[in-house]
Amino acid sequence: MKVTAICPGSYDPPTNGHVDILSRCVLMYERVVAAVVVNPSKTALFSLDERMDFLRELVPGIEVRSFSGLLVDAATEWSAQVIVKGLRGAADFEYEQQMAHMNRHLTGVDTVFVPSSPELMFVSSSLVKEVSALGGDVSSLVPGIIHDAMKERHVG
């Protein structure tokens, strides 16, 4: 059976943590879908198309799609057998465990947790944007193309 894993996120911007988790998923699953969430209530730094293009360039071997609404509906539509979530620490686990149980209750799709690499445990898109906007150097936390794009937007 060909196993499809769906890896959801806003990916705004994609960080080295995202690239790490997605790259590891490519080694574990036959089909990996980076599912970029469309959230009209949030103002994104990068457009949906930009984020999707970044991911395609950064992680060979993945499929990149967007969704709005319930993740489990996208997982069902795309025939995903598993949802993969990266975990940075205990706080992530507490929140994601509740979501995993709800998703399984709704559709039977299980969630697999992949721990982040130790050197990336503190990296989040929100924190990267905040530090960069305040003039901090985030070049070691995001891929080069993301850092360059952030500098073009005067966010770093």
Image (cartoon, helix red, strand yellow):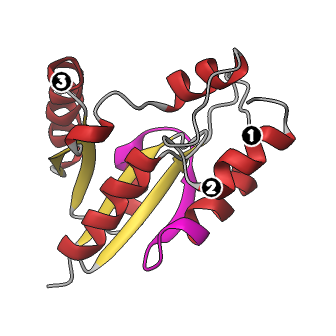
User: Mark 1 = which residue?
Assistant: 150
Q: CA distance from mark 3 to mark 1?
A: 33 Å
Of the image marks 1 and 2, the number of the one nearer the N terminus: 2
Indicate the quadrant containing the C terminus: top left, top right, bottom left or bottom right. Answer: top right
User: Mark 2 = which residue?
Assistant: 144
Labelled disc at residue 103: none
In this orientation, which residue lies closer to the viewer: 47 or 104? Answer: 47
Q: Residue at x 51, y 38 (%)?
A: 69
**10 Å neighbourhood of mark 3: few (<14), some, or many (≥20)?**
few
| Residue 46 pos. (x, y %) | 74, 42
Labelled disc at residue 98: 3
Q: CA distance from mark 1 to mark 2?
A: 10 Å
Residue 78 lies left or right of residue 26; in this view the side is: right
Which amino acid does the dot numbered 2 rest on? Gly
Residue 58 lies left or right of residue 76; in this view the side is: right
Q: Is residue 58 magenta?
A: yes
Indicate the quadrant containing the N terminus: top left, top right, bottom left or bottom right. Answer: bottom left
| Residue 149 pos. (x, y %) | 76, 48
User: What residue range appears in magenta?
Assistant: 57-72
Q: CA distance from mark 3 to mark 2?
A: 34 Å
Of the image marks 3 and 2, the number of the one nearer the N terminus: 3
Residue 22 lies left or right of residue 119; in this view the side is: right
| Labels 3 and 2 touching (C-beta < 8 A) | no
In this orientation, which residue lies closer to the viewer: 20 or 49? Answer: 20
**10 Å neighbourhood of mark 2: few (<14), some, or many (≥20)?**
some
